[in-house]
Image (tube, rainbow, N blue to C red):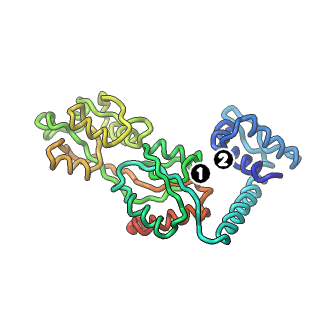
């Protein structure tokens, strides 16, 4: 019985689907199937049964899963302990970033990490929330920043702050929309958000609650680009309050009002990496630069 076989068993059990497990493990589906078959032959019991939507644990599989998780956790703890015995912590981390560096307090955070752990190499990858979440889920990124609701139990979430959003309007529409209600706002074009952006879900939720269905002008994947579209007069949009108010003071757009909704900004990482020393140092540095978050 090999550790990699137990890791495959656990991942298939979590995902309930061979293809999704193979994607996360960076293996082919036949390789995943072969590892499960080898484990079943060695244990002498069937671990999974096929269903219309994927695979389900057998009763034997349900009983053996906690044991496999204990063994895998024990192996990680042993490796982590061995690393700590070698001396100063070292390693490489890839972190997904979104929004602006100032919003994430990225500079101070990286500075704290570098000062305390000079052998830890950090690289950042700019993206959109949905993409960062998916890459963290698949462990293509070690951690990342995310806005919105995380639906995955396999990804751990540390809330940092709530971001309030407002409705931003092109200056050319201010006279027409002063005193307007949501129904009138819905008659005008809106700048849409990419499906990979958490703002797409925010727009859909607000429109549904307000019972409007505006015509979308494109699907934009960055909030800065969405703001630029509003300033260019292409349509209305939901933007973070602080950025929208700054743009309003500079005469680049007009803020109609609040959406009455906040979006949570969080730090995320794979749940099974909870005990990893490198995750621990990232979280400790977050505590220093986000003291009000109560992490």
Q: Secondary structure at mark 1?
A: loop
Marks 2 and 1 close (CB-CB < 8 Å): yes
Q: Of 32 and 177, which appears nearest the observer?
A: 32
Furthest residue to the front?
119
Residue sitting at 70 percent across and 67 percent down?
82
Q: Which mark is residue 73?
A: none
Q: Secondary structure at mark 2?
A: helix
For the question of whether residue 295 can be seen, the reply is no
Q: Is residue 220 above or below residue 163?
A: above
Residue sitting at 55 percent across and 61 percent down?
279
User: Where residue 46 sits in the image (x, y, percent)?
Assistant: 83, 43
Question: Seen in the image, is 90 located left or right of residue 59?
Answer: left
Q: Is residue 75 above or below residue 39?
A: below
Q: Quick one: label 2, few (<14), some, or many (20+) residues within 10 Å? A: some
For the question of whether residue 285 can be seen, the reply is yes
Q: Quick one: label 1, few (<14), some, or many (20+) residues within 10 Å? A: some
Q: Of 28 and 47, which appears nearest the observer?
A: 28
Cα distance in 3D space between marks 2 and 1: 8 Å
Q: Of 176 and 241, which appears nearest the observer?
A: 241
Pointer 1: what residue?
A: 154
User: Where residue 66 sits in the image (x, y, percent)?
Assistant: 73, 57
Question: Seen in the image, is 41 located left or right of residue 17?
Answer: right
Pointer 2: what residue?
A: 14
Place residue 89 in its image quadrant.
Answer: bottom right
């Amino acid at each position: 019985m090999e550790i990699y076989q137990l890791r495959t068993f656990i991942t298939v059990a979590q995902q309930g689907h061979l293809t999704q497990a193979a994607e996360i493990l960076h293996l082919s589906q036949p390789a995943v199937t072969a590892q499960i078959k080898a484990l079943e032959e060695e244990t002498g019991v069937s671990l999974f049964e096929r269903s219309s939507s994927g695979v389900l644990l057998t009763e034997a599989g349900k009983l053996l899963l906690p044991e496999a998780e204990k063994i895998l956790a024990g192996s990680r703890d042993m490796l982590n302990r061995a690393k700590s015995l070698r001396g100063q912590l070292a390693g490489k981390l890839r972190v997904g970033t979104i929004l602006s560096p100032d919003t994430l307090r990225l500079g101070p955070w990286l500075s704290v990490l570098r000062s305390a752990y000079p052998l830890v190499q950090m690289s950042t990858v700019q993206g959109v929330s949905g993409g960062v979440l998916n890459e963290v889920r698949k462990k293509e990124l070690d951690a990342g920043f995310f806005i919105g609701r995380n639906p995955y139990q396999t990804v751990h979430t540390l809330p940092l702050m709530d971001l309030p959003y407002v409705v931003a309007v092109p200056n050319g529409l201010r006279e027409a929309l002063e005193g307007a209600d949501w129904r009138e706002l819905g008659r005008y074009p809106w700048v849409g958000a990419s499906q990979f952006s958490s703002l797409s879900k925010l727009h859909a939720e607000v429109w549904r609650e307000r019972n409007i269905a505006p015509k979308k002008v494109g699907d934009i994947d960055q909030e800065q680009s969405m703001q630029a579209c509003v300033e260019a007069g292409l349509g209305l949009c939901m933007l973070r309050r602080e950025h929208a108010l700054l743009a309003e003071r500079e005469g680049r757009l007009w803020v109609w009002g609040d959406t009455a909704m906040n979006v949570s900004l969080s730090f995320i990482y794979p749940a099974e990496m909870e005990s990893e020393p490198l995750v621990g140092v990232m979280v400790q540095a977050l505590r220093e630069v986000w003291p009000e978050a109560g992490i």
